[in-house]
Image (cartoon, rainbow, N blue to C red):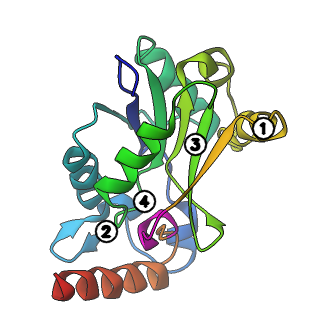
Amino acid sequence: MNPRPPIVIVLASGRGERFRAAGGSGAKLQAPLAGRTVLEHTLAAVRGSGLPWHLEDAGHPGMGDSIAAAVRATADAGGWLILPGDLPLVLPSTLQAVARALVDPVQAAQPQRRGERGHPVGFAAACKPQLAALTGNLGAAPVLRALREAHAVAEIEVDDIGILTDIDTPAELARAEALLMARLSAS
């Protein structure tokens, strides 16, 4: 890994409009999940990874704006792992695997489970100008697409349903709770 490890950027600026529109009450990141909030579970995984991290919760208008602000705030990082705050089941080992994959010539790394791509997406330090210039709701998708076309993205196969388990509706929250309880009973 780089001498300067990548920083995990936890995105927590969203307004959770889909969650409320689907019948949820309050902010989805503060929704209860097995005795803690969704965001507390996500942050616990980040802390468990041992990687440095930055919580971006300043209420930016779009995901791209949030990513850009976080990259500018952590400009000396050895790269970034972009992790939406509503992925409470992601495993610390997945975060570590994505971070380890960011070695030259790889410019981005994305985990996948059974062929389905998820989060966090890792970006090398060389991506700073593109990430710091992001705006709007697309997040880093345009940067990742350009890197994929340049064959500079590592796909990392993981056995982690957490990379795909985001919380946008109360039904998804209930599903995440069931998955978490099954994980806890199996350990």
Q: What secondary structure is found at the residue carrying circle 2?
A: loop
Query: Which is more foreground, mark 2 or mark 1?
Result: 1
Query: Which is more foreground, mark 4 or mark 1?
Result: 1
Q: Which residue type does callout 4 highlight?
A: Asp
Sooner in the amino-acid sequence: mark 2 or mark 1: 2
Q: What secondary structure is found at the residue carrying circle 4?
A: loop
Sooner in the amino-acid sequence: mark 2 or mark 3: 2
CA–CA distance in space, label 3 to label 1: 11 Å
Q: Which residues are magenta?
A: 158-164
Look at mark 2 in the image and give the residue it sits on.
Answer: 31
Query: Which is more foreground, mark 2 or mark 3?
Result: 3
Q: Position of residue 182 (x, y in %)?
A: 27, 88
> Is the residue marked by circle 4 packed among few (<14), some (14-19), or many (20+) residues within 10 Å?
many
Q: Position of residue 55 (x, y in %)?
A: 34, 36
Q: What secondary structure is found at the residue carrying circle 3?
A: strand
Q: Position of residue 108 (x, y in %)?
A: 61, 36
CA–CA distance in space, label 4 to label 2: 10 Å
Look at mark 3 in the image and give the residue it sits on.
Answer: 109
Q: Which residue type does callout 2 highlight?
A: Ala
Sooner in the amino-acid sequence: mark 4 or mark 1: 4
Please say whether residue 55 is visible from this viewpoint: yes
Eyeballing the image, is 111 above or below 69?
below
Pointer 4 with pointer 2, Cβ within 8 A = no
Q: Position of residue 128 (x, y in %)?
A: 59, 18
Q: Which residue type does callout 3 highlight?
A: Ala
Look at mark 4 in the image and give the residue it sits on.
Answer: 86
Q: Which residue type does callout 1 highlight?
A: His
The residue at the point 53 percent across, 19 percent down is 125
> Is the residue marked by circle 2 packed among few (<14), some (14-19), or many (20+) residues within 10 Å?
many
